[in-house]
């Protein structure tokens, strides 16, 4: 299996964020709570983000202390091991607010990596 570079992992994060943003545009909490397929999709996207974030070097993540890196990593463990206890409101908040805040940081990291 090929080793994924940081650039590819950041692209995975960006793709997951964009999918979540598109699917959650205008979705109320009540609508989210009543749509099990949507909940599953959001959980999958957040899981991908969480796993890919684990590969950002600490010295790079430290440049953006406003991002809750530890919590992003921790939600992945919760989704993998305690999926039956996932709080719908927490996931809705992540999908409608927190991924919006993460996106510009990921875009900036990609720009730095791709710069000549």
Image (cartoon, helix red, strand yellow):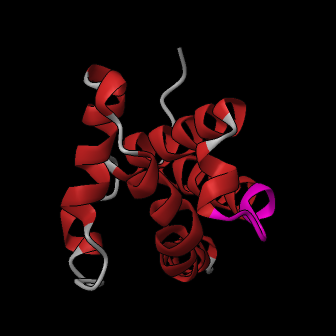
In the visual, does 57 lie left or right of 93? left
* Residue drawn where x is 38% and y is 52% of the image: 53
Q: Position of residue 56 (x, y in %)?
A: 34, 57
Q: Is residue 27 above or below residue 51?
A: below
In the visual, does 36 lie left or right of 97? right
- Between 11 and 38, the one nearer to me in the picture: 38
The range drawn in magenta is 22-28
Q: Position of residue 11 (x, y in %)?
A: 64, 55
Q: Was residue 61 drawn as part of the magenta stretch in this picture?
A: no
- Between 3 and 98, the one nearer to me in the picture: 98
* Residue drawn where x is 72% and y is 60% of the image: 24
- Between 100 and 26, the one nearer to me in the picture: 26
| Quarter placement of the C terminus | bottom right
* Residue drawn where x is 36% and y is 44% of the image: 87
* Residue drawn where x is 27% and y is 85% of the image: 66
Q: Was residue 23 drawn as part of the magenta stretch in this picture?
A: yes
Q: Position of residue 105 (x, y in %)?
A: 48, 79
């Amino acid at each position: 299996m090929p080793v994924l570079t940081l650039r590819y992992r950041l692209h995975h994060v960006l793709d997951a964020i964009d999918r979540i943003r598109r699917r959650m545009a205008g979705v109320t909490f009540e609508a989210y709570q009543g749509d099990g397929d949507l909940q599953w999709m959001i959980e999958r996207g957040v899981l991908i983000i969480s796993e890919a974030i684990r590969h950002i070097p600490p010295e790079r993540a430290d440049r953006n202390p406003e991002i809750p890196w530890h919590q992003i990593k921790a939600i992945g463990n919760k989704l993998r091991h305690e999926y039956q206890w996932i709080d719908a409101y927490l996931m809705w908040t992540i999908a409608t607010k927190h991924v919006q805040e993460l996106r510009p940081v990921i875009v900036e990291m990609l720009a730095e990596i791709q710069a000549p």
